[in-house]
Every structure is written in C-alpha cells, then in structure tokens.
Image: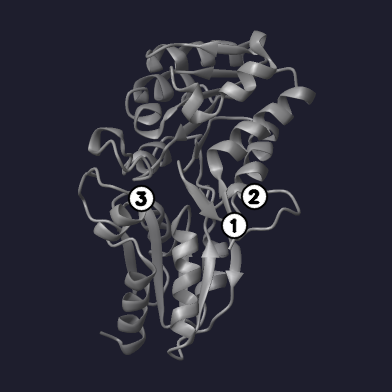
Amino acid sequence: MTLENLREAYGKTLVELGAVNKNIVVLDADLSKSTRTILFQEAYPDRFFEMSIAEQNMVSVAAGLSLVGKIPFVHSFAVFATGRTYDQIRQSVCIAGLNVKICGSSCGLSDFGDGATHQSIEDVALMRVLPNMVVLVPADANETRKMVKAMVKHYGPMYIRINRNDLPVFTSEEGEYEIGKLYQLKDGEDIAIFANGVMVSKAMIASDMLERKGIYAKVINASTVKPLEKEEILRYIKGVKGIIVAEEHSIIGGLGSAILEQIRNVKHPPVEFIGIKDKFGTSTNNYEELLAHYGLTAEAIVDTAISLVRGE
C-alpha cells in the first residue's frame, strides 16, 4: 500500500500551478514549513505574503487581493483557518462571493500531539453553513493534487481540509477532479459507506473485512461535502440494507448531516455515523492511537455494518 503526504502534495501542486498562473498568490500565518507553502515562497517570493499570527488580517488582505484579480490561497491549521477567521470569511469573502481559497492544514485529529486546541473537529460544519462556500476533503495525495487544480479553475470561496500525515493512496492520478461528484471506489449490494479524508482508507479496509464475512459494502468517496447533490446520493443507496457515513469530524454538522439533509424527504435505509461524538480532541503518542480512541476505525465500520444488515 503506497503512502503519501497530503501537505507535500498540496505545496508542490501550488508551485506547479503558480508557474503558469501568475495571479496565484499565497498567504500564510507563520506556519509555512508545516503547511508546505514554504515551497511556493521559495519559488515565487514576490507572490508570497507572511502574515504572521494574524489570521483575521490574512483573510481580509486576501479579500482585497481577490478584488484586483488575484487568486489568493490562505493557510493555517484548520482550527485557526476556520474558527479564528470566521467573521472575516463570512463578512468579507462569502457575502461578496470573492475568489478566496482557504486551506485548513493539519485538520481533524491529525495534529495528534497538540491536543484539543489544535485539532479541528468542527471546521467542516463552520464552512459548510456559509452560503457560496465550497467544502472539499481529499482522501489522499492524488486527490489533493487534482482538487487544488480544480480550485484554481472554480471562481468563488472554497475551503480545503488537509490531513497532516501520510495516508494510503486509493484514488487515480488520471482525470480531473469534478466538484460535487461522488466517486465509487468499491462496489457492493448490502451496505453503502460514504467516507472522506482518512476514513476512506478505513472504509476500504472495512469493506474487505466485511466481504470475508459475506457482507458486501460499496465505498463512496464523498470528498466534496458541499455542494452535495441528492441524485448523486440516491444513485448509490438504491437497494442497500444500510448506510454508513464515516468522517474525521464531529457527527454534528459534517458529511453525515449533509447527506441526511439531502435524503430527508425520501424513503431510505437506516443511517449510522462513524465520527467524533460531540467531544473535543486530546493529545496522544500517535495518530492511529487517537483515531482508535474516538472509534474512527475499520473495525467500528465493520461492527456497524453487521448491525445494520441484521436490523439491530
């Protein structure tokens, strides 16, 4: 199984795009080595702006840059890029529909050593509720690269959530990323598992484990959380006995909520969430240990799928 770092893929793709599109500018809040925007700074120092630990000001400056035709990408840890800057994103970027791209790095629990203050378990909910905002959660490095290219082509406010760690590669290098499209990675007639981010790899492992038990689960990579189309969801849940939504985020306001909002007025199978159950993060020795602590595992998906098939 190939592992690649999403932050590195993100930073290198920005550099690649910056070579052909001179309107791309990058702003960072004193975390460029971590977010990997240091690569852009080294390549195009005249288009890189170190804003120091002043995230609100960074977003306001980005809004101004967008008004003169630039394509600003702003960066911080996800918890700060969305929470500390919320008023500026809402008032200056989203109401006006400006072409500002926000990168929340070290998302979810992936900054496992720094605890609740640095772990974003509510960022998708914060960004998803804002009119005009597109919300993207890549599953791996390949998808990250394609997403960043799609972000440059799409006009308007966008948020991308980047994991800090190396993750297994499941998506193809080929083709372009389509915003709003769901991508099926595995077929199965018993259970539909919708997942994004690190939980895509957990869902793929769970699907293999379930198959050995005679339960067949399809895995759908829901890497666009917003916009999310009803018809796209209905296509994948037809005929299954149960639906599982797996995300490294609070079960309140994230992908699970987005899916249920779309199918609320149609008959559908039972739905269960694998996510963080209304708790803050904590610190630990390694990422996998933290995921296990919050029940974000392939085993949890397997147990939930078995219960759904049995009608428990």
- Answer left or right for 218 relative to 298: right
Q: Residue at x 42, y 11 (%)?
A: 52
Who is closer to the viewer here, 292 or 182? 292
Q: Which residue is mark 3?
A: 287
Q: Disc 1 or disc 3, which is closer to the eye?
A: 3
Q: Amino acid at mark 1?
A: Val
Q: For the C terminus, give its image quadrant.
A: bottom left
Q: Residue 146 in the image: x percent, y percent?
A: 67, 44
Who is closer to the viewer here, 107 or 115? 115
Q: Height in image: 44 above or below 136? A: above
Q: Amino acid at mark 3?
A: Tyr
Q: Tell me the SS state at disc 2.
A: helix
Q: Residue at x 41, y 54 (%)?
A: 255
In this orientation, does residue 48 appear?
Answer: yes
The answer to which quarter of the image holds residue 5 is top right
Q: Disc 2 or disc 3, which is closer to the eye?
A: 3
Q: Which residue is mark 1?
A: 169
Q: For the N terminus, give its image quadrant.
A: bottom right
Q: Residue at x 52, y 78 (%)?
A: 238
The answer to which quarter of the image holds residue 3 is bottom right
In this orientation, does residue 71 appear?
Answer: no
Q: Which numbered disc flags the more N-terminal residue, 2 or 3?
A: 2
Q: What numbered label is drawn on residue 142?
A: 2
Instruction: Specify few, some or many for label 3: CA neighbours under 10 Å numbering under 14, 14-19, or 20 or more.
Output: some
Q: Residue at x 34, y 83 (%)?
A: 306
Cβ–Cβ under 8 Å for marks 2 and 3: no
Q: Residue 214 in the image: x percent, y percent?
A: 46, 91
Instruction: Specify few, some or many for label 1: CA neighbours under 10 Å numbering under 14, 14-19, or 20 or more.
Output: many
- Answer left or right for 302 relative to 196: left
Q: Amino acid at mark 2?
A: Asn
Q: Which numbered disc flags the more N-terminal residue, 1 or 3?
A: 1
Q: Tell me the SS state at disc 3.
A: helix
